[in-house]
Amino acid sequence: MTRLDMFIDRMVSQRACLDFAIAETALMGGPVFELGLGNGRTYDHLRDRVTGRPIYVFERAVASNPASTPPEDMTILGDVRETLPQAVGRFGDTASLIHADLGGHNLAKNDEFARLVSPLIAPLLAPGGLMVSSDRMYFDALEQVPLPTGAVEGRCFIYRRP
Ligand code: SAM
């Protein structure tokens, strides 16, 4: 498998998982959290497909395409290791959908970071809410959900708070 194959699998899986998670949580009113803005592609997808729910973006340094840059008042600027614990005080466990795409090229570092942020993400998710991630996460209280059609095993992960 080439790097191009893996990249395509990741993109196709992200879209399939986000579309599934948006539909599954459509009747929930709580906010959507995008962790890691990057270029803003997945933010743009969320913005297009999510209706009636505010979308907050967590990012340490905004460098997105101007066409998919969130408004300042919806951007929670800073390192998620600090902003996620602060968000628990502000939002509690109200998020209907959390999408995390915080990783880079180093898979071992991504895994280490996923272990670190998992306990910071879990307290933000509402009962019944879904968490979509490009990396395997390490949750005690959330259960893993089977991937929807079109997503590739290992390229995306979905978790639900029972
Ligand atoms: N999903 C995005 C898209 O579709 O364009 C790509 C996200 S990119 C792979 C990862 C982003 O996470 C980068 O913008 C990076 O700055 C951000 N990030 C990584 N670690 C972070 C941290 N500790 N705190 C806040 N943002 C972080």
Image: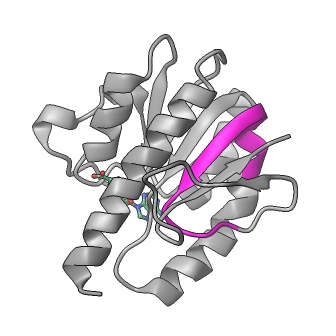
Identify the residue shown where x is 71% and y is 40%: 124
Identify the residue shown where x is 64% and y is 39%: 87
Residue 61 coordinates in the image, percent (x, y)? 31, 54
Q: Is residue 154 left or right of residue 122?
A: left
Where is 98 relative to 105, above or below?
above
Q: Which one is nearer the viewer's eye here, 149 or 36?
A: 149
Q: Is residue 18 left or right of residue 115?
A: left
Residue 55 coordinates in the image, percent (x, y)? 46, 27
Point out the residue furthest to the front here: 149
Report the quarter where the N terminus lies: bottom left
131 is within the stretch colored magenta: yes
Identify the residue shown where x is 24% and y is 86%: 2
> The magenta stretch spans which residues?
122-137
Q: Which one is nearer the viewer's eye here, 86 or 37?
A: 37
Q: Is residue 88 left or right of residue 64?
A: right
> In the image, ligand 1 is in what quadrant?
bottom left
Q: Which one is nearer the viewer's eye here, 89 or 112?
A: 112
11 is within the stretch colored magenta: no
